[in-house]
Image (tube, grey):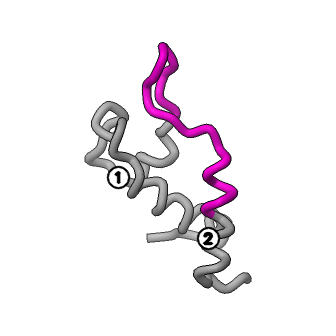
């Protein structure tokens, strides 16, 4: 398993930033559900515009999702 170094996490974040995540905009529905899902008290509407922390958490956990439960 790759060590979770700052350099590796930065690489993952850079790759994840290329994914087209967006809130509701220009008639498009939000696709933030994978980012918001770990936060059960958030709705997509509440997360729209303030989802940067959820994105950081997603970047940290996504590479390791196949290794079992992640807190």
Q: Which residues make up the magenta segment?
A: 13-31
Residue beneath the point at 53% across and 69% down: 69
Instruction: Check the picture and name the quadrant holding the C terminus.
Output: bottom left
Q: Position of residue 22 (x, y in %)?
A: 51, 35
Q: Position of residue 25 (x, y in %)?
A: 45, 22
**30 is within the stretch colored magenta:** yes
> On the image, numbered disc 1 is attached to which residue?
39
Q: Residues within 10 Å of mark 1 (few under 14, many from 20)?
A: few
The image shows residue 2, relative to residue 48, as above or below, that is: below
Assign a secondary structure to mark 2.
helix
Residue beneath the point at 31% across and 37% down: 43
- 47 left or right of 1? left
**53 is within the stretch colored magenta:** no
The image shows residue 69, relative to residue 50, as above or below, that is: below
Residue beneath the point at 29% across and 44% down: 42
Q: Which mark is residue 10?
A: 2
Magenta-highlighted stretch: main secondary structure?
loop
Which quadrant of the figure has residue 45? top left
Instruction: Check the picture and name the quadrant holding the N terminus.
Output: bottom right
Residue beneath the point at 26% across and 47% down: 41
Q: Residue furthest right?
A: 1
Q: Earlier in the sequence, mark 1 or mark 2?
A: 2
């Amino acid at each position: 398993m790759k060590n979770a170094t700052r350099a590796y996490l930065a690489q993952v974040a850079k790759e994840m930033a290329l994914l087209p995540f967006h809130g509701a905009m220009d008639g498009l529905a939000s696709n933030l559900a994978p980012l918001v899902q770990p936060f059960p008290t958030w709705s997509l509407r509440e997360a729209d515009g303030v989802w940067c922390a959820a994105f950081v958490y997603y970047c940290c956990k996504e590479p390791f999702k196949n290794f079992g439960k992640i807190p």
